[in-house]
Amino acid sequence: MPAHVDPSPTLAAALAALEDGDEARAEAIVTAAVAAAAATDGKASATYAWALSDLGVLRNAAGNWRFAITAMREACAVDIPGDRSAAEARCADLKILGELLMRAGQLDEAAKAIEASCTLRAAVYGKEHAGYAFGTEALAALEAARGNLMEARILIDATVANFVANRDVQIAGALALRAEIRERLHPGCPLFDDVRDLPEEVLVDLAQAAIGRVDRGEPGAVLRALLDVRELVAAASPFHPVVLTLTQAIATAARLAQDHDARIEAFADLRRAYDTYGDRAAALRAMLGQAAAHHDAGRRTAAKAAYKEAIGRADDVGDAWKSVALRSYGLFLAETGRTKAATRRLRAALDAAVRAGDAELTARARIALGISLQHGGDRDEAAELLDEAIAVLHPADPDALVARTHRLVPSGGSTCCERYPEVYATVVKEMAQARLPPGLIESLTITPGEGVVINSARESTDEEAQRVCQVIDLVRHEIEERAAKVRGG
């Protein structure tokens, strides 16, 4: 199974099951293939290594890094001298393992895996081949993560030169990484001065690669790279859809970099673009993003004006967006100490959500109003609103978690935040218990910075203990994903 090919039929079926939301079936499909390969060909075979690699890829796709790493370690341990196809697959697996370890913060072990991939690539492909450059690209990313920027620069320059010499269209990831490294070394320097005539398909790949660095690279450098990539793409094809995608990524990167001006400008760009396209709902969403950016920047007057304009515009978009705009403004007023005004807006937001007939939107409006009322001393109505909302939203939903926290502390106040870890652990336990045989989790404690403590009602096998940890990782990832979707840019 050489590198850079389509997924195996087994992995394709598992990924389809994962896409349908059936993580257990997806895992079962691949683990069955692993067991079959071990039984038929043995654990020193290429088919066994390929099946383990599929398992690692699947677990990574599910957000289960810890067990993806375990599978990839086992796959990489299979070395079959003289089998070029197996060697090519091992090159890719070592690189994937290194990148997973980087995401887990295990940089020393990541270095060993990526360096082993580079050594094997040199033997399999030769250092002039593009196959070698994929290894040095990963090594450059590792050195950048370690802060060894000069070493990273040497490696990424060699990588780009290799791809150029081989006319390899998969150069985009290396160009995006090189831009980030250049910016970190020499802020404000040209990032793409030598690649201004790229084909459109490569420019789109470059845009996607730069977007993919948002949650992985240094925020300020990623932001600068995104801005320059957008300029490149817009110069070649100003109305290409990826320009808007880049602008959305710029808003997110600017938030991470705490560059308030860049974030505000990104939302302004989105608003203008959506107004031009006649997409009123998207333009309103951008206006609300801009209002939130003004608020985060401490510019309350600008934020208030933006929220009010958004509410006025929402009349032409519909009750659902009217509710979102009113709720956003009500939360802003609550944060700035205007409790009575906030409550009025939040009641109006709930009324609009009910008119819209959207159950999820109505639940979020109930939570916002309920918390406002609870902090204002109206505990009875607050409890009713929060309970109704909790019954509707998924337990892992970030608003549902906040609502459950407030139900634990009827008096409100700062202790609401103090009870959040307890609620979070309870939700993780309940969701994990629903996916596991009875008795494997009796109680669970999650302490920030210290990890997870699990108590079982019975003795568990090593396989069961591993499965418990895997499911807990998956549940925590699901909660994080839901929070990221709600938070947006």
Image: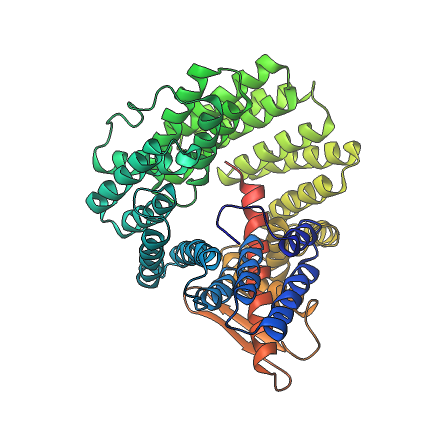
The x and y percentages for residue 30 are 63, 62
Above or below 137: residue 41 = below
The x and y percentages for residue 432 are 64, 67
The x and y percentages for residue 13 are 68, 53
Residue 446 showing in the rendered view: yes
Classify residue 408 by image quadrant: bottom right
Along the line of sight, the residue nearer the viewer: 113 or 117: 117
Q: On the picture, is 151 further left or further right than 44?
A: left
Above or below 186: residue 123 = below
Q: Residue at x 62, y 49 (%)?
A: 399
Number of marks drawn? 0
Above or below 91: residue 185 = above
Q: On the picture, is 462 further left or further right than 234?
A: right
Furthest residue toward bottom:
459
Q: Residue at x 63, y 38 (%)?
A: 343
Above or below 458: residue 481 = above
Furthest residue toward top:
276
Residue 303 showing in the rendered view: no
Q: Residue at x 41, y 58 (%)?
A: 94
The x and y percentages for residue 300 are 44, 29
Classify residue 34 by image quadrant: bottom right
Q: On the picture, is 307 further left or further right than 83?
A: right
The structure's colour scheme is rainbow
